[in-house]
Amino acid sequence: MDSEKSGEATIAIQEPKTDPKGKGIAGAPAPSVATTKTIRQQPRGGWKKGIAIFDFVLRLCAIATGLAAASLMGTTEQTLPFFTQFFQFHAEYNDLPTFMFFVFANGIASGYLILSLPFSIVCIVRPHAVGPRLFLVIFDTVVMALTIAAASAAAAIVYLAHNGNSDANWNAICQQFTDFCQQSSTAVVASFITSAMFVLLIVLSAFALRT
Amino acid sequence: MDSEKSGEATIAIQEPKTDPKGKGIAGAPAPSVATTKTIRQQPRGGWKKGIAIFDFVLRLCAIATGLAAASLMGTTEQTLPFFTQFFQFHAEYNDLPTFMFFVFANGIASGYLILSLPFSIVCIVRPHAVGPRLFLVIFDTVVMALTIAAASAAAAIVYLAHNGNSDANWNAICQQFTDFCQQSSTAVVASFITSAMFVLLIVLSAFALRT
């Protein structure tokens, strides 16, 4: 399958010349003088291999940022050393369901990225293999949707925690929980970087699928 | 370009038989008895055309849901007929920055989908054209990221409006603004449907790019 696609085979066939003396029998194929076959192989796998290697490196970076996002959000907690008008003095990621979803989604994304590495290696070894590439595009798209959903939902909550909303009477809790907010904001940024890498991975795969 | 790719041309060349009587001159091409060329055309554009038509229909549906999401969220407002302990008696989508982003993002997505229709038509007419298909994949991925980000950010806020958060001392405003919350929830659902259609569009395009 790969050898068929590895080069553009150009078959030049010299057409059989008809006998000028008209000895050919009508209906029978004309006898040929010469039949030459020229097969030129044009290697085209180079840039596909380059894309596959870049895909692999990008996946490693995305694993790093995904794990960083999940662990940063998962470990964020803060206990205030003083009393305020709020009845909450301890903040943890699992106080907010959105942050729990964030840790879950980024963990799933990192796990998927680690499992996708063998497929990425297959794409490096066999740059023209369509199956693993298609598998990666489909799952990349689904996991990208999950990651970006988690990142933007957490971003909406972090924005609210920073700025509050006077119309809804929601207070800006970051005035008290500064460290908690800073760490969760960093986690959101890391998750958005992971999402951007997923977008790049999908676009790269689309280019690699192109023939 | 299309005509080259529209079918797999199988050229079967009957090899020239050497003269059994050994009259052929050494070095000169052996005279052939018969040379037959059989060109079989296997149409393979059918399923690609099918994908392109489904892509077009899906885009029309996504325009409908995207516009529905933007207009539902953009028109949601409610004025309470009674006094409560809250100082806010009028709720509109632009009270919450996340909802403004939601309307903006869904409007952008709908506009992009309308502009992408001609490219989708080109893909129906020329199922093997790679350029428009690649263009659609890249922009679909970017706009999908925008749509899903808007949908999930709004979902996080709508969830908060419905349930509140006692740890952060954020009240559930939906106990008062029931119509406002119901309409914005419907808009979020419509936006998630649009996002799911985008995922399907990208997967379909990946299959169409495959050769």
Image: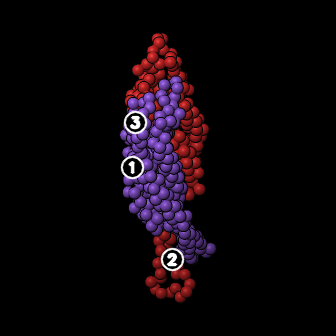
Chain colours: A purple, B red
Q: Residue at x 42, y 30 (%)?
A: A86
Question: Residue A140: where, in percent of width, then height?
Answer: 44, 50
Which residue type does callout 3 highlight? Phe
Which residue type does callout 2 highlight? Ser
Provide the residue designation for mark 2. Answer: B32
Which residue type does callout 1 highlight? Gly
Question: Residue A80: where, in percent of width, then height?
Answer: 42, 39
Q: Is residue A148 visible?
A: no
Q: Residue at x 59, y 56 (%)?
A: B1
Q: Residues within 10 Å of mark 1 (few under 14, many from 20)?
A: many
Nearer to us in this view, A199 or B90: B90
Provide the residue designation for mark 3. Answer: A89
| Marks 2/3: CA–CA distance | 96 Å
Image: A119 above or below B118: below
Image: B97 above or below A113: above
Provide the residue designation for mark 1. Answer: A107
| Marks 1/2: CA–CA distance | 69 Å
Pinpoint the chain carrying mark 3: A
Give the number of marks. 3
Q: Are marks 1 and 2 on the same chain?
A: no
Q: Residue at x 47, y 78 (%)?
A: B17
